[in-house]
Amino acid sequence: MSMTMTQKILAAHCGKEMVKPGEFIEIDLDMVLGNDITTPVAIKEFWKMDAKEVFDKEKISIVLDHFTPNKDIRSAQQSKACRDFAKQMQIKHFYDVGKMGVEHALLPEKGIVKAGDAIIGADSHTCTYGALGAFSTGTGSTDMAAGMATGKAWIKIPEAIKVTVSGEPSKYVCGKDVILHLIGMIGVEGALYKSIEFCGDGIKNLSMDDRFTIANMAVEAGAKNGIFPVDEKTIEYMDERVNKAYEIFDADNNAAYEKEIEINLSDLRPIVAFPHLPENTKTIDEAEKENINIDQVVIGSCTNGRIEDMRMAARIMKGKTINENVRTIIIPATQDVYMQCIQEGLIDIFIQSGAVVSTPTCGPCLGGYMGILASGERAITTTNRNFVGRMGHIASEVYLASPAVAAASAIAGKIAGPESV
Amino acid sequence: MIVKGKTFKYGNNIDTDVIIPARYLNTSEPDELAKYCMEDIDKNFSKKVQKGDIIVGCKNFGCGSSREHAPIAIKASGISCVIAESFGRIFYRNSFNIGLPIIESAEASRQIEKDDEVEIDFETGKIHNITKNEVYMAAPFPEFIRKIIYSDGLVGYVKDKIYNKMPEEKI
């Protein structure tokens, strides 16, 4: 019997030659991740397990990114709990204010996740690292606690959906449009409990930043993980950052897939997901016709806060003024992305056009702080969820789109594509 | 184990943001979280819920964020079980990990209505709708999940297996 790429990585991490869909296994972990919201719960559970030490202080990452720099006293207490634990356990990859960035942009950039790894994170968007050819999946805090204590996690071997990508995207089409298009096709539970495995010769036309965005939102289709094969671009990315050996896995040629889907990048248009589910997608051409006025734009997050996202937003906003009715919040996802924005003059462009630029934080994406919406307000954002109340009041609305569409909408004051401004 | 209670009924894709909104994630105290459970979709849930009550959802219950605060809030509200046609996968594992019983049953999810009185036997997977006098059978839990349930969650499982060195077959 043959295996998918995900199944092969999982088999290798539980010492088996072969695994089958539906089988329960316990895998050895290469990295266990948590943030300032999920780690405090994990620490409590860790002590309840009678654990004394972490399994490996180099294989745990704690990133204080959600409500930091702390928004209130309770958040400060939570960060302090993480900080104290990280010090006590001598956690190597602990990132506090000044070093931290949005976790799923930060870990690949620091080279601490890599191809062939098995990674769990107490954050649903941990599936991002599938872009590097790793198995990585979101779990809860108790899983994080067990992972920190034992270096293991329980996993049910998933079936897979195969997505064959061909063609080349047009100028303003990026990773966000690919994944929103896919979620629009299969729905928010279209890949429930499954892997989404990308393949095909169109992948070479997707940058690493595009692939991170695509893998990041696999969870919005319900998937356990999204994964890309390792190619020259992946190797080049890792060789600049990773200083450990990595392992490249490929799906067997005759691997069985539950479903097969084809996406031709050349056919795609920029996509907007309407409230209140990421599956409610329309092309920018359809969306523009509805004349939807907006109050706020957010460009950032683990989905779209990387340097290419910033460059794209700057390209659209350069020399233009943001509509007087729109507040635009731009959040480079890490300190390195922030510095690169400064060096390339992007911050000047943002501020001159009327945007604010913030230190890295997840803040507004989950309605934490730094851009909460009032009743009846509408935002277009490059984040990943548009659920009821996600960014603030339950009577507010969130539209999801790429940095190009979000930036164009900021200028236009209503949902607009980059070709319209 | 048998539980019995009145049901709260919700639709498809009940996400963890509405189960416990992020504005309350600056704490992880179960009783505190319970005060705001389901607030954005059912304002009076925390006032109406009684110990033993059951939540019935449809497809993809608990999708979205990995926050364990969601099943923690539900459990601390006194809910004895969540039934749905399917669950968001992280919510699914979090629930077993923290000792909140959940059951997948398309039939029960379809047939049970708000305020029905329902009794669930976790051993047999029998779901008895007392109000409608109907019985729905759910598939039994996989063996590995049973072990976690018998250990009262993943904390107990890890404790038994790793730190108390209990042989796997005894868990």
Image (tube, helix red, strand yellow):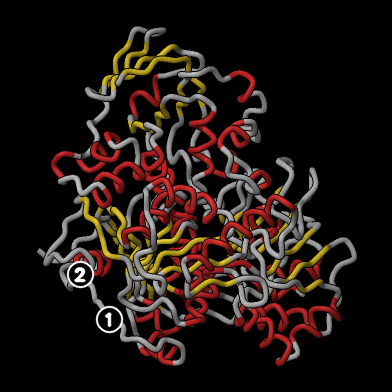
Q: Label 2 vs label 1: CA separation?
A: 11 Å
Q: Residues within 10 Å of mark 1 (few under 14, many from 20)?
A: few
Res. A12 mark? 2
Residue B45 vertical placement versus A45 (above, below):
above
Chain under disc 2: A
Residue drawn at the location 35% of the way across and 86% of the way down? A244
- Horizontally, residue A132 falls left or right of residue A36, namely left
Front-lying residue, B159 or A107: B159
Front-lying residue, B106 or A174: B106
Amino acid type shown at disc 2: Ala
**Residue A61, x across and y down, in percent:** 47, 69
Res. B140 mark? none
Residue drawn at the location 40% of the way across and 84% of the way down? A234
Residue B6 vertical placement versus B23 (above, below):
above
**Discs 2, 1 touching: Cβ within 8 Å:** yes
Residue B58 vertical placement versus A207 (above, below):
above
Amino acid type shown at disc 1: Glu
Q: Residues within 10 Å of mark 2 (few under 14, many from 20)?
A: some
- Horizontally, residue B36 falls left or right of residue A351, namely left
Residue A296 figure quarter: bottom right
**Residue A304, x across and y down, in percent:** 59, 71
**Residue B53, x across and y down, in percent:** 48, 19
Q: Name the residue under label 1.
A: A247
Question: SS of the residue at dot 1?
Answer: loop
User: Can residue B64 be spotted in the picture?
Assistant: yes
**Residue A265, x across and y down, in percent:** 46, 74
In the displayed image of the protein, which residue is found farthest to the right? A324
Q: In which quarter of the image is the N terminus of chain A?
A: bottom left
